[in-house]
Image (cartoon, rainbow, N blue to C red):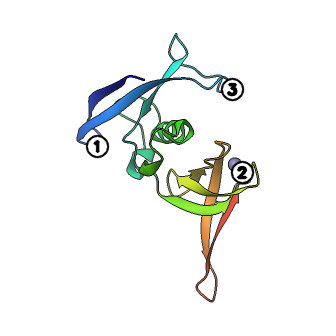
Amino acid sequence: MKTENAYCSGCGHQVRLVLVDAPPHDGQANLPDGAEVVCLDFHEGCSEGRCPTTGKKGIVMGVRLAKSHLNDAAFKTVRGRCEFCEEVADLEVLDSTFAVCPLCGATNRWVVLELADETRITLTGH
Ligand SMILES: [Zn+2]
């Protein structure tokens, strides 16, 4: 796996980019060889707008990184039940709306509800 450093004008510092093979079910490979760029330095703020380094929507870069598992530490997580595989997992937060299931790679909508006794529960949905 080849890592390349690039200056990201969005983050204001060097980021690490990796070329990975696109997942076969993705169906939207943009590079001729079927590879896609994953930024290892994605963080929550990148979800807004467009990634200046790759030209992709920021949230797309987040989904790619989450699915690649190349830097799971980059994500905050919320404990919740994935609406797709129905497992309880530490969902990787992309932004205040979306989180990726580390088990099946599906993108869930999520919201935290605080109950009267201050218990917090995470609700997920498609
Ligand atoms: Zn899942």
Mark 1 or mark 2, which has the lower sequence index?
1
Q: Are marks 1 and 3 in contact (CB under 8 Å)?
A: no
Q: CA distance from mark 3 to mark 2?
A: 19 Å
Q: Residues within 10 Å of mark 3 (few under 14, many from 20)?
A: few
Q: Is residue 84 above or below residue 19?
A: below
SS assignment at label 3: loop
Callout 3, which amino acid?
A: His
Quarter-of-image position of residue 78 = bottom right
Q: Are marks 1 and 2 in contact (CB under 8 Å)?
A: no
SS assignment at label 1: loop
Q: Residue furthest front?
A: 1
Instruction: Identify the residue at horizontal 50%, vertical 15% (top origin).
Output: 31
Residue 77: x %, y % from top left: 52, 58
Kindly identify which residue carries mark 1.
11
Q: Which numbered marker is on residue 105?
A: none
Q: Are marks 3 and 2 in contact (CB under 8 Å)?
A: no
Callout 2, which amino acid?
A: His
Kindly identify which residue carries mark 2.
126
Residue 74: x %, y % from top left: 42, 49
Residue 7 left/right relative to 77: left
Q: Residues within 10 Å of mark 1 (few under 14, many from 20)?
A: some
Kindly identify which residue carries mark 3.
25
Instruction: Identify the residue at horizontal 38%, vertical 22% (top origin).
Output: 2
Mark 3 or mark 2, which has the lower sequence index?
3
SS assignment at label 2: loop
Instruction: Identify the residue at horizontal 30%, vertical 36% (top origin).
Output: 15
Q: Nearer the viewer, residue 55 or 34?
A: 34
